[in-house]
Image (tube, rainbow, N blue to C red):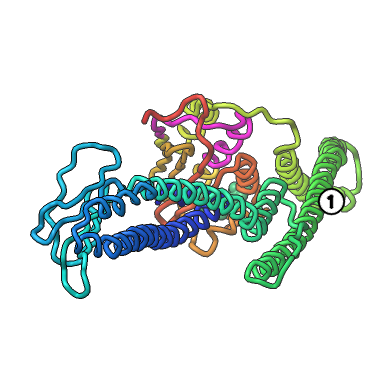
Amino acid sequence: MKIFQNLSIRNKLIVIVLMVSLLSITLGSAFVIYNNIQTFKDNMISSTDQIAQFLAEACGAPLAFEIPEEVEKELNKLKGMPIVENGYVYGEEGEIYKSYNKSGDHFTPPPPKDETSVEFKGEYLHVSRPILSGSERIGTLYIRASTAPLTQKINSYLQGMLLGFIGLVVLTYLLAVRLQRFISQPILKLADVTGHIKEEGDYSVRVRKEGEDEIGVLYTGFNDMLEQIQMREKQRDEAMAEQQRLMAELADKNKELEQVVYVTSHDLRSPLVNIQGFSRELNYSIDELISLLRSEEMPAHVKEKFAFILEEDVPDSLKYILSSTAKMDSLLSGLLKLSRVGRTATTMGDIDMNELIAEINNAFEFHFKDAGVAFTVDNLPSCFGNNDELNQMFSNLVSNSLKYLDPKRPGKISITGRREKDKVTYCIEDNGIGIEKEHQKKIFEIFHRLNPDDSQGEGLGLTIVNKIVSRHNGKIWVESEPGKGSRFFISLPAAKANPPVQ
Ligand code: ADP
């Protein structure tokens, strides 16, 4: 059954037609053969019986008048019947009166029968008929006829039938091969079209309908389905094209924005440096003026006024100018740092995080000691990324942990990490002031600061961290409880050359 299921449709149809035809031809032929063989036998029986009947009648008178030569003469007429091998005439008592033996072979005739009898036995047909004189039985005629001609006739008939049968089978096969196309061809055509669609992804093809039968309905359904897929493909292509256009527009705008931030933060710093420099110069000049003022002779009230302006007003204003420019300077350098992330070509590779954190530890050692902070680091798994950017990212996070420690308790900062499949997750934990739930997402936004007056900063540190993380296809999230501390998690791609031991 499995072999049949795996046959092609074409071969399945041929096999089905052949099987059905063979079965009906075989049954029909068997019926015809049986009937014809019966007819052949009946014909032999009736012709032999007729001979026996004639002979019995012809022998009646010579036997009644006991003329043996005449009986023998009649029996010898059997020579004209080649199928008759033996003929016997029995007398009234059952004794053999006269006999005829065609081949002369020894043969023991059966005892005479009372009734007329015709029967096939062995390779002969045995016929017995009573010999009558009037209505009185005076003897018996027995004839033995060979069935060899009948067998030969049946054999050649069977051979003919066999040839006919073979011819019919061949004809049926040829017809099946030709006719199966009406069913298999449309299905194969459909399979061809499906194969073409699968290989080329071309949904514009259609199958040409050739009739209104079930296959025609299937073709219509198939074409409708292709139409719908093609329509959806078109919509999807259009949506993708639109998406790509928007992405390109967004990338352009992003680039433009980065350029603006870069140019602004870069270019604004030189006039700022000038303002800072000249303000300092002004400061020196004022100091000089004050010393001059102290030495020169001048009316006391004018001197007092000058002194007030030079010692109070001007230094006050200069102080504000200097602190504002310092603030502006740090803001601009923060923006510059932000815009620089990703501007330069970054080389990515496996990063030994233990080494990287050791460098950060060195840089912050003084601050840790100064603030009395316990800084601990686990053995960290390596990751894949850019050394400078990751250094910047961890420095910002460590710096924040230091900056937002709780003055009420000794500070603790730790860095841990673990590897899972092709990802590593690091955690920077502190026991600082913590962050309220509603601010935990917003702190990654640009310029977002929670308590601007309590600490120094521009609200750019975490924005830079976020940008570096996304450039590394990583993730960052925070878990924090106000008054207890914060845990910043960073997930990054794991180092490639150092796969985990399975
Ligand atoms: P900045 O530190 O310059 O203000 P950041 O972008 O680095 O800017 O941080 C944004 C805000 O997130 C900070 O103002 C601070 O309120 C909060 N924050 C960041 N790190 C921590 C931390 N470890 N603990 C408590 N608050 C933090």
Q: Inspect this view and state whether residue 417 appears.
A: no
Q: Secondary structure at mark 1?
A: helix
Residue 382 located within the stretch drawn in magenta: yes
| Residue 400 vs residue 488, the one in the foreground | 488
Rendering coords of residue 66 (x, y %):
18, 58
Which span is picked out in magenta? 376-399
Q: Quadrant of the C terminus?
A: top left
Q: Inspect this view and state whether residue 229 appears.
A: yes
Decide: few, some or many residues near mark 1? Use Cα within 10 Å; few <14, some 14-19, many ≥20: some
Q: Which residue is mark 1?
A: 309
Rendering coords of residue 234 (x, y %):
77, 61
Three-letter residue code for mark 1:
Ile
| Residue 223 vs residue 389, the one in the foreground | 223
Rendering coords of residue 334 (x, y %):
70, 43
Q: Residue furthest toward the bottom? A: 135
Q: Residue at x 16, y 68 (%)?
A: 137
Q: Residue furthest toward the left? A: 93
Residue 450 placement: quadrant: bottom right
Q: Is residue 219 left or right of residue 289?
A: left
Residue 40 located within the stretch drawn in magenta: no
Residue 113 against residue 329 in the figure, above or below:
below
Q: Residue at x 85, y 36 (%)?
A: 281
